Amino acid sequence: MTPPLQEQWFILAGIANVVKDKKAKRTFPPGADVSVAYAEPPRASVLTVPYRVSSPSSLCSYPYVAAADSSGLILLCATEPEGTNSWVTYHLCDARTGEDTCLHEHNRTVGIHGNKLGLMVRGGSCVVTELQPAGDGTGGALLLSYTVGQYRWVEKELAYLPPLHREWRGEGVISHGGMLSWVDLSYGLLSCDPFADTPELLHVPLPSVGDQLPVLSANGGAHRCVRVSGGMLRFVQIHGSPDAPVVSTWALV
């Protein structure tokens, strides 16, 4: 039998390249607001945007790719050009058409690294969501959703268990199986269907091992991660002796 065709995939660099508007107009495809330079893995493909979308990278801030979808949509956290009022804005970039859509601002504080931002495409709809779990022990969380084409953010108050008594340590957001999962490696996952009228947050604890390697709080993802691989959501942890480490993998079923 002929093996099934596999989807072509790319590695997308986390930090976007920024060029002057004149250079963008000269080098981008006609009518394009943004451009993606594709490269065969293991080389990284790079999103390039003009100054009018984001200021260039600096030691303190940089335009960061928060999420991407196989449809070609890329969610960018852009640092605002000098002279504007806001520090960070969200942009939805279409790698296939070169179109850039700036999402309207909302009234909540946003993070420069986009570690609470998720993106999901279903049918002809696209939703961008940001989850803000409370760390005061109340178990409350605020879900902000922006459905493309509706031009507004919708706020929903949700609840989760067990409640956190500290700040959420975001390690990214994963789209899989019709759910968005927010990752905190020391707590687990908080998952929900962002398209649901009344989303329900589900807590998924991560497996634990007794011989885990010491982890610095500033580098919690050095020895473990949650990713999609082989069509399944997987948790990988390096543990054991530093001289003879062991790599263990679990799959969510």
Image (cartoon, helix red, strand yellow):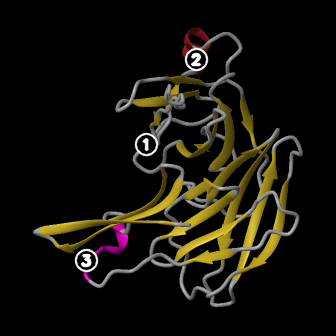
Q: Quadrant of residue 101?
A: top right
Residue 216 pos. (x, y %): 30, 73
Q: Residue at x 49, y 29 (%)?
A: 3
Q: Earlier in the sequence, mark 2 or mark 1?
A: 2
Mark sitting on residue 249: none
Residue identified by numbered label 2: 24
Q: Is residue 234 something one can see in this rendering? A: yes
Q: Nearer the viewer, mark 2 or mark 1?
A: 2
Q: Nearer the viewer, mark 3 or mark 2?
A: 3
Q: Nearer the viewer, residue 35 or 200?
A: 200
Residue 115 pos. (x, y %): 55, 59
Residue 208 pos. (x, y %): 39, 80
Q: Amino acid at mark 3?
A: Pro
Q: Nearer the viewer, residue 64 or 4?
A: 4
Residue identified by numbered label 1: 58
Residue 223 pos. (x, y %): 31, 66
Residue 54 as seen in the image, left or right of residue 154? left
Q: CA distance from mark 3 to mark 1?
A: 31 Å
Residue 106 as seen in the image, left or right of residue 244? right
Q: Residue at x 76, y 59 (%)?
A: 194
For mark 3, give the secondary structure.
loop
Identity of the residue furthest to the front in this view: 1
Mark sitting on residue 214: 3
Q: Which residues are magenta?
A: 211-219
The chief SS type of the magenta part is loop
User: In the rendered view of the protein, which quadrant contains the C terminus?
Assistant: bottom right
Residue 109 as seen in the image, left or right of residue 125? left
For mark 2, give the secondary structure.
helix
Q: Amino acid at mark 1?
A: Ser
